[in-house]
């Protein structure tokens, strides 16, 4: 029976001839600072600002899902009058407003460290941004990373803006039925009650951009979210200027078919680049966070060609010099690919604007040696940006292997993909209790300079008892939150109040609590800990050493395997022996994540190595003293030191997935039984597990100063943003003089490269060579009109394996010693420093202004 039939207050009626208007809350002048604070997402990582809004009405704060703007809009006149007369509240509000003003005007890291580059500015494009649960336009890890990137950029004073899409329905709300099967509900976002402002021109008109498409012109209007010092611009297509089909483009995140996805990525990339122009913002560097926004590179080229009358190659070099790219997934299926027919349907006019033929255009998105059938956004981004990185050291290695064929014949270790390991915005993810502890014993440096190791060394000063009591409070709150959420879920599914009250008794606030929360893709192996059911039951049902598991996560709507894993876990949680020991929390989001990473004792992570690019949930857990228990994948390869957590299994490869799952599940059980559980329950006379606490302190001291977004931002600035900005501005200077020269040089090199040929070579090898002796090598090469200054002739050498491949090679540049017309003689030496079978080879790479260039297909081995 539909109970809503009896609830006439929820009736909707579509009246004719409606006149639409917008009601706004009438906030008195004395309370106007609340509006200012609510409209800057800085409040979401300031503990006192959060408490300011919470104290207005704690129940309503929860009801509005921690949305200050919506909270203020729901206040009654009586509540407003009470706030105006509450001197304590007014003082609290003024204190927070003063803190915001001070934050916005203070000198920053960028002011002090990058004063010579004060005029530079950067743009950061991402398909999702997770700033806070009250702005639900995110899915998971990529969005959280993007949001934390903006927050640290704000803290550090980077002249950076964000660009993304504003989704009408965001990502889906997860509804689990009584069997545990995931259903999806899409809840419409109320933009007027979110921290959004319409971006308007001088005439007060909503700024919009238009993009040509085969379905007609797409219009996208701009909104802004202020994230501290950083503006985040978002485009949405859901308004009357578009047809109903085009309104759907920004309906939901990661929804629809391939055609919907290419439409979204065109609006994000091409529309985003057009928005920058409309706002008169010309970034020195654009950071493409994952390949979804890479179409912006095409629009930037088009602008140079049409506005500045540049030839294609010159425009390409300009755009490439000012663009950097971060790839986020080592799973091939996770990299966006479109069929060439779809690419031409939507982008053939762009190819015409770029003055290049279709086949040339399509090769942007394929390996050079392939007959392209599909267009890879990752390949395109790697080809058309000047710098690229993976998000952990291991992920960069995997990425170089995945994308090696872009740079044919270049050894894997030289593929130009470096690593900048992800981090977290520590101030966002640290609990209120740990905020207080850190302020008391570490000073404010943990917030202002979280990458300073000496700040985190002060963790040792925190008394064990205070640290443990703070952690126990968070565990208790996690248990209370889990009970309330499970109770609500049961009631929503029609379970009686009496039966649902069972949820009020699940879990034990004093038990060892294992947390597991992430996207439920099959490679994340959410069910690995349950592989040997008898053994995990024995662990969980031990009355002397109580252990429990709290899990959360969403499967993609089309991922039936992931949904089945969730269903199986929930079925298991109903086992009479386990029903108080396992809880799966519905609708994982930022709020649920906070409770979990702040309240668990152990953070479990067991993906298939090496398919976890980085992972950041374990970093959030570490900031709250939660100990990581993880596969040596992603960031944990770099963070684990054998004293600050536990590893699962080893880095050795297994013959099959079955054997890998067996081995690593057994590793989980053995480590729990032999190490983790005994340490947790080994308590001194004052009921404190001091050995465990020392491990907590070790974890925080070693992980927090490294795995934070301030350190990450520093690396992006020093390795990517500043060098790329300098190069980009060089090419733009003097009416693009150097851009013309570089593009002419590249065209000349491409035209003549294949004509380079080897004439002769000599070396001083005679029998075996003793260690510490040198081998002299001399080669004569015909460069076919290319100058010797434009090539790097190198000796590539090292030990060889059974397949005669050179392992761990080293390279040394040969010197020009003679010239005869187009024939050049180069000489070099290599030091014999290893015993065994060794070999060398000669190769030639292009060199521009003294710097070796890694250009796809431009390398020659002799």
Image (spheres, rainbow, N blue to C red):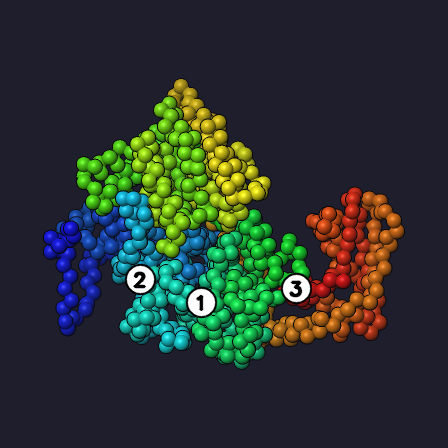
Q: Residues within 10 Å of mark 3 (few under 14, many from 20)?
A: some
Q: Please state if 644 lies on the left or on the right of 255 as rendered.
A: right
**Residue 815 coordinates in the image, percent (x, y):** 79, 61
Q: Is residue 46 visible in this depiction of the protein?
A: no
Q: Position of residue 272 (x, y in %)?
A: 42, 68
Q: Residues within 10 Å of mark 2 (few under 14, many from 20)?
A: many
Asked if the residue under mark 1 is in contact with the one under mark 2, i.e. CB atoms within 8 Å, the reply is: no
- At mark 1, the secondary structure is helix
Above or below: residue 779 compared with residue 464: below
Residue placed under numbered mark 1 in the picture: 269
Locate the C terminus by quadrant: bottom right
Residue 557: where, in percent of width, then height?
36, 55
Real-space Cα separation, disc 2 to disc 3, in angstroms: 44 Å
Numbered label attached to residue 853: 3
Of badges 2 and 3, nearer the viewer stands 2
Q: CA distance from mark 1 to mark 3?
A: 27 Å
| Pointer 2 residue | 168
Q: Which residue is drawn at the image coordinates 52% and 36% (left, top)? A: 663
Q: Is residue 523 left or right of residue 812?
A: left
Among the two numbered marks 2 and 1 on one chain, the one whose residue lies closer to the N terminus: 2
First in residue order: circle 2 vs circle 3: 2
The answer to whether 383 is drawn above or below residue 561 in the figure is below
- Left or right: 742, with 6 as reference point: right
């Amino acid at each position: 029976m539909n109970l809503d039939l009896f609830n006439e207050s929820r009736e909707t009626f579509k009246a004719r001839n409606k006149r639409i208007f917008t009601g706004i809350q009438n906030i008195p002048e004395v309370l106007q600072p609340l509006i200012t604070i609510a409209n800057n997402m800085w409040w979401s990582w300031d503990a006192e600002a959060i408490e300011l809004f919470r104290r207005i009405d704690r129940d309503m704060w929860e009801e509005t899902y921690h949305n200050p703007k919506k909270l203020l809009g729901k206040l009654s006149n009586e509540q407003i009058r009470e706030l105006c007369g509450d001197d304590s509240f007014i003082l609290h509000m003024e204190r927070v407003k003063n803190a915001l003003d001070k934050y916005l005007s203070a000198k920053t890291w960028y002011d002090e460290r990058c004063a010579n580059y004060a005029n530079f500015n950067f743009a950061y494009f991402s398909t999702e941004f997770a700033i806070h649960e009250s702005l639900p336009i995110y899915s998971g890890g990529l969005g959280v990373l993007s949001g934390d990137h903006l927050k640290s950029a704000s803290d550090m004073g980077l002249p950076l803006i964000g660009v993304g899409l504003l989704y009408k329905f965001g990502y889906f709300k997860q509804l689990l039925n009584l069997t545990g099967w995931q259903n999806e509900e899409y809840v419409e976002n109320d933009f007027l009650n979110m921290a959004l402002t319409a971006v308007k021109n001088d005439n007060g008109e909503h700024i919009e951009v238009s993009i040509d498409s085969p379905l007609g012109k797409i219009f996208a209007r701009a909104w802004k979210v202020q994230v501290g010092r950083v503006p985040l611009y978002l485009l949405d297509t859901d308004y009357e200027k578009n047809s109903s089909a085009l309104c759907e483009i920004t309906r939901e995140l990661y929804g629809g078919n391939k055609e919907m996805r290419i439409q979204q990525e065109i609006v994000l990339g091409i529309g985003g680049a057009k928005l920058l122009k409309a706002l008169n913002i010309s970034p020195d560097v654009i950071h493409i966070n994952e390949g979804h926004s890479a179409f912006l590179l095409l629009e930037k080229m088009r602008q140079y060609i049409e506005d500045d009358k540049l030839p294609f190659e010159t425009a390409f070099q300009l755009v490439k010099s000012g663009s950097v790219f971060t790839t986020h997934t080592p799973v091939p299926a996770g990299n966006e690919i479109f069929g060439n027919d779809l690419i031409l349907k939507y982008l053939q006019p762009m190819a015409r604007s770029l003055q290049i033929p279709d086949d040339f255009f399509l090769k942007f998105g394929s390996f050079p040696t392939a007959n392209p059938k599909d267009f890879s956004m990752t390949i395109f981004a790697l080809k058309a940006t000047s710098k690229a990185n993976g998000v952990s050291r291991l992920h960069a290695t995997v990425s170089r292997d995945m994308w090696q064929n872009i740079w044919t014949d270049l050894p894997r270790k030289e593929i130009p993909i470096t690593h900048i390991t992800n981090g977290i915005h520590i101030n966002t993810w640290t609990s209120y209790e740990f905020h207080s502890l850190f302020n008391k014993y570490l000073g404010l440096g943990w917030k202002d300079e979280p990458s300073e190791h000496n700040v985190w060394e002060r963790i040792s000063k925190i008394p064990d008892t205070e640290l443990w009591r703070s952690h126990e409070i968070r565990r208790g709150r996690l248990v209370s939150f889990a009970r309330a959420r499970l109770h609500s879920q049961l009631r929503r599914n029609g379970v009686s109040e009496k039966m649902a009250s069972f949820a009020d008794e699940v879990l034990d606030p004093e038990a060892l609590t294992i947390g597991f929360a992430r996207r439920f893709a099959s490679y994340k192996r959410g069910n690995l800990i349950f592989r040997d059911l008898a053994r995990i039951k024995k662990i969980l049902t031990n009355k002397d050493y109580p252990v429990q598991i709290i899990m959360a996560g969403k499967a993609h709507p089309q991922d039936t395997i992931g949904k089945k894993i969730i269903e199986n876990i929930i079925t298991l949680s109903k086992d009479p022996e386990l029903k108080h020991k396992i809880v799966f929390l519905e609708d994982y989001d930022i709020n649920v994540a906070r409770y979990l990473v702040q309240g668990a004792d152990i953070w479990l992570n067991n993906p298939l190595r090496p398919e976890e690019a980085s992972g950041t949930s374990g970093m959030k857990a570490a900031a709250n003293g939660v100990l990581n228990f993880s596969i040596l994948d992603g960031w944990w390869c770099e963070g684990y030191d054998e004293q600050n957590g536990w590893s699962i299994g080893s880095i050795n490869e297994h013959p099959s997935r079955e054997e890998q799952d067996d081995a690593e599940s057994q590793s989980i059980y053995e480590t729990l039984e032999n190490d983790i559980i005994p340490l947790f329950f080994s308590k001194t006379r004052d009921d404190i597990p001091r050995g465990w606490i020392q491990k907590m302190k070790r974890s925080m001291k070693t992980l927090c100063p490294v795995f934070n977004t301030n350190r990450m931002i520093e690396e992006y600035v020093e390795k990517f943003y500043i060098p790329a900005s300098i190069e980009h501005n060089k090419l733009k200077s003097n009416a693009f003089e150097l851009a013309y020269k570089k593009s002419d040089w590249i065209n000349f090199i491409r035209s003549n490269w294949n004509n380079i040929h080897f004439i002769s070579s000599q070396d001083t090898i005679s029998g075996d060579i003793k260690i510490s002796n040198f081998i002299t090598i001399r080669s004569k090469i015909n460069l076919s009109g290319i100058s010797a200054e434009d090539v790097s002739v190198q000796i590539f050498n090292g030990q060889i394996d059974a397949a005669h491949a050179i392992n761990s090679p080293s390279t040394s540049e040969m010197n020009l010693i003679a010239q005869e017309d187009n024939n050049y003689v180069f000489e070099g030496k290599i030091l014999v420093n290893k015993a065994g079978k060794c070999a060398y080879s000669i190769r030639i790479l292009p060199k521009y202004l003294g710097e070796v260039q890694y250009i796809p297909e431009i390398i020659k081995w002799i």
